[in-house]
Image: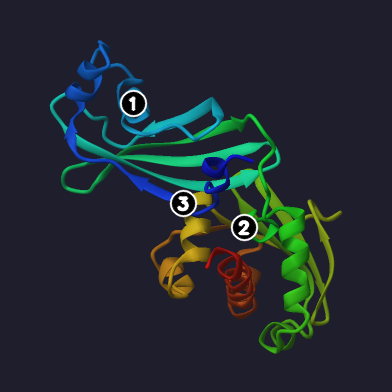
Amino acid sequence: MSSALASIRVGVRTATGTEPAADVLDRHGLRIPARSPSFGMVVAEWLTDPVPAAERLGVTWSATTPITGSDRVHATTVVTRVGPDGIDREVRLLDDTGRVRESGTETWRTEIRTEVIPSLDFCSIEWGEQLCGRLHHDAAFTSSVSTWDGTVGLRCGNREVHLRIYKGQVIDVTRRALLGATFTFEAAPVTWVDLMLSDSDDFMRRALRGEFSSAGNGYEYLRLTKPLHAIIQNARAMAREVHS
């Protein structure tokens, strides 16, 4: 594996300088109508460096407030997944006030197989199995679900893992439980990165700001805030051990 590619791991961030959007396109000899839905996406593509030794396969893009040629913008990126099938990277296009105007997720295929770190591959089966091992030894978790019988779903983007819990123990880790999840905790990939790798455990603050969502039994989701927080704390410990 090349040294440049080896440095690409979940949580790696970049930021560009600020300049007029029109100047970015002019520098590369591009002419795109300002009202085109792809205007901001193309600006972001030429502002940011590509992933080393990789080919971009696709991008999903959305605009909160589309930029124009006269807007002064800069771009930020954060790697949200390094998996066996490639790399996902979140790209944001911000104006000179720091407001996110447009954003998207790029998918890259590498020329050589990347090293997958299970504790950073949020909501994969391997990640769930590592998490399960920690939860068995966490008294805060086991005591808070000592009488509970159900399934907690954890979702990151299009990946979901189910933890089947019975009397204080996770008895199964699966992609999808036979009867489905009692409730599913959901967050965008970039939110998972921020939650797992931030210096402080700000789970409750983010929850109050509405950065997470849930599906399924809302009552059980609220009732199990304590064990859910224990799950997040253990997942954070896993991620930070390999990221430090």
Among all residues in the image, which is located at the extreme front? 3
* Secondary structure found at label 1: helix
Query: Could you classify mark 2 by the number of other residues whose Cα lies within 10 Å: few (under 14), some (14-19), or many (20 or more)?
Result: many
Q: Position of residue 194 (x, y in %)?
A: 46, 60
Query: Could you classify mark 1 by the number of other residues whose Cα lies within 10 Å: few (under 14), some (14-19), or many (20 or more)?
Result: some
Q: Position of residue 100 (x, y in %)?
A: 29, 44
Front-lying residue, 233 or 224: 233
| Side of 105 where 158 appears, left or right | right
Residue drawn at the location 49% of the way across and 41% of the way down: 89
Amino acid at pointer 1: Trp
Numbered circle sitting on residue 12: 3
Numbered circle sitting on residue 120: 2
Q: Mark 1 points at which residue?
A: 46
Q: Can residue 181 be seen in this view?
A: no
Decide: is 25 above or below 64.
above
Q: Earlier in the sequence, mark 1 or mark 2?
A: 1
Residue drawn at the location 46% of the way across and 51% of the way down: 12
